[in-house]
Amino acid sequence: MKKVKFNLGILNGKVYTENKLIKTSIGIKGNKIEKIGDVRQDECEEIIDFENKLILPGIIDTQVHFREPGLIHKEDIYHGTKSALLGGITTIFEMPNTSPATINNLELEKKVNIAKKSSWTNFSFFIGACKENIKNLDILEKLEGCAGIKIFMGSSTGSLLVSEDKDLELALKTCKRRVAIHSEDEIRLKNRFKTINKLNGVLEHENWRDPESAIISTKKVIKYAKKYNTKAHILHISTKQEIDILKDKGEFITVEVTPQHLTLFSPDCYNKLGTKAQMNPPIRSIDHQNGLWNGIKNDIVDVIGSDHAPHTLEEKSNSWPNSPSGLPGVQTMLSLMLNHVNNKKIKLEKLVKLMSENPCKIYKIKNKGRIKQGFDADLTVVDMNKINIIKNTKMASKCRWSPFHGMQLKGHPVSTIVNGKIKMLNDKLIGSPDGKVVNFE
C-alpha cells in the first residue's frame, strides 16, 4: 500500500502561481502547500477536482467592521466571517470601532478570544488610536492578533477620533508598522454640516462630505508620513483629486479603494437606494469613479478592501442625516471584482495583486498571498463563467441585505480553502469555525 503524501489533493485546476495561470495540481499537507505539480489520487487522503476552475491565492480583506463586541444586532464575528468565506475570503482584518472600542491590550484580547471560537476565516484586529494611547502605539501595534493601528481622522465618535494635527503627527511619528487611516477632515465636516440643506435628504451626503474634506486630510497624511517615513495606508479613497495627489506618494504610502466606489456612482445610487448607498467617504460621481479606475490602471491603488460596515435595515430606514453610514460588502467584494475582470475593467493578474499579494506585502503577513511550496494553504477557487444574481436572502451577514441586490454578475467563488481545509464548496459551508490568528513578520 502506497504511503499517503498529502492530506488534500487539488487536481486539474488552472493555478495562479508565479504571476501566471498553469494547468496543474496542488498537494496540501496539514495547513501548508507541499507540492505544485503532478499529484496523483492515490497519494492523497482526500481529493477534489477543480477542472477548468481558477485557483487563486486566498483573498484577503483588510477592512471589515464586524461590530463585536457591543453592536451584535448589526453583525458579529461568526456571521461576518461566514459571509467572508462564502465570498471567497480566507483572511480578514477587523476594525476597532466596536463597543467598547479596541484601544488597549484587554479589548484586543477579548476580540481574539471570541474569534478563536467563532471565526470561519483567519483573522487579525486593528487597535484604534486615541488620546489615551497615542504615546504607546508602538507597543500596542506589536501585540499578538494586532493588524496594526487604525486612525480615524473624521467620521468617528467618542475616543477614536484623531482630529487634531498634533495628535495625527504624534501617532504617525510613534508607529513603526503600517498605519491604516480613514482620511476625512473633521473640522471641515463639522463646519459644512452647519450650512447644508438637510431637507435634500441623502443626496446631500456627498455635498456635505465634499472632495475637499478628503483632499485636505490626505495631504496631511502625506506630509507627516513623508516627514517620519511612516508606512501609511489610506483607506477607501473616493476622489480623482486624491489619486492625482498620490501619484508621487513615495515608497511609504499605500492606497485602498472599495468595490462600492468602483461600481456605484451618484446621483444614480442615491436615487435608487436612498440611505442604503450612504457610506463614508461617500460614493461620488462617475467622474470620480473613473479617476479611481485610472488609479488602478496606473498602479497608484494598492489594495481593494470591502469596508464591510453593516447596519440593520431598520437603522438604515431613518431619514438622512439620522441614518448611519456604512454598507455590507464582504460577501460580494470578490464577485463584483470578477465581474469587472470579465468586463475588461481590470486584469486578473492585477486583481490578485490588489486582493492577495499586496495585502501581504503591505502588512508583512507571513506565508500568505502566493501559491508557493511551504506557504499556507489558503486558496480561493473561482469560476469565471458562473452567473450569480446577488440577493438579500443569500447574504449570511446578520443585517441580511446588500446594496447590490438584484445585480447579475459573471464570475463567482466556488470554493474557499483555509489552512488546508475545504471550508466552502458551491455556496455551502463545511465543518465549523476554526480560523487562526494571522502571523506577521
Image: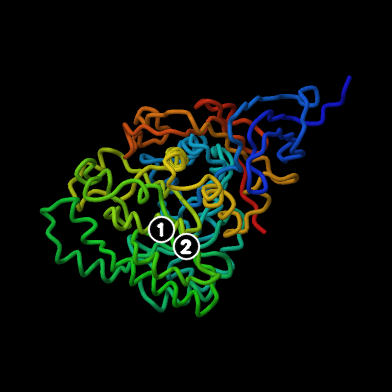
User: Three-letter amino acid code at disc 1?
Assistant: Asn
Residue 9 picture location, percent across and down = 72, 29
Where is 393 relative to 337, above or below? above
- Residue ID for mark 2: 300
Expressed as whole percent of the image width and height from the top left, the position of residue 354 reads: 52, 52
Corner quadrant of residue 156: bottom left
Where does label 1 land, which residue? 294
Is disc 2 surrounded by few (<14), some (14 to 19) or many (20+) residues within 10 Å?
many
Q: Nearer the viewer, residue 269 or 123?
A: 269
SS at badge 1: helix
Residue 118 appears at what percent x and percent y? Answer: 54, 37
Instruction: Mark yes or no: residue 136 visible.
Output: no
Image height of 239 relative to 372, above or below: below
The C terminus: image quadrant: bottom right
Check whether the beta carbons of the residues at disc 1 and disc 2 lie within 8 A of each other: yes
> In which quadrant is the N terminus drawn?
top right
Residue visible at 22% across and 41% down?
272
Residue found farthest to the right: 1
Seen at 38% across and 77% down, the residue is 165
In 3D space, how far apart are the residues under numbered discs 1 and 2 (Cα atoms)? Answer: 8 Å
Q: Residue, x 75% and y 44% (percent of image)?
A: 373
Left/right placement of residue 95 relative to residue 195 reads right
- In primary-sequence order, the first of circles 1 and 2 is 1
- Residue type, label 2: Ile
Left or right: 117, with 44 as reference point = left
Q: Please, which residue is most extreme toward the top here? A: 1
Q: Nearer the viewer, residue 355 or 65?
A: 355
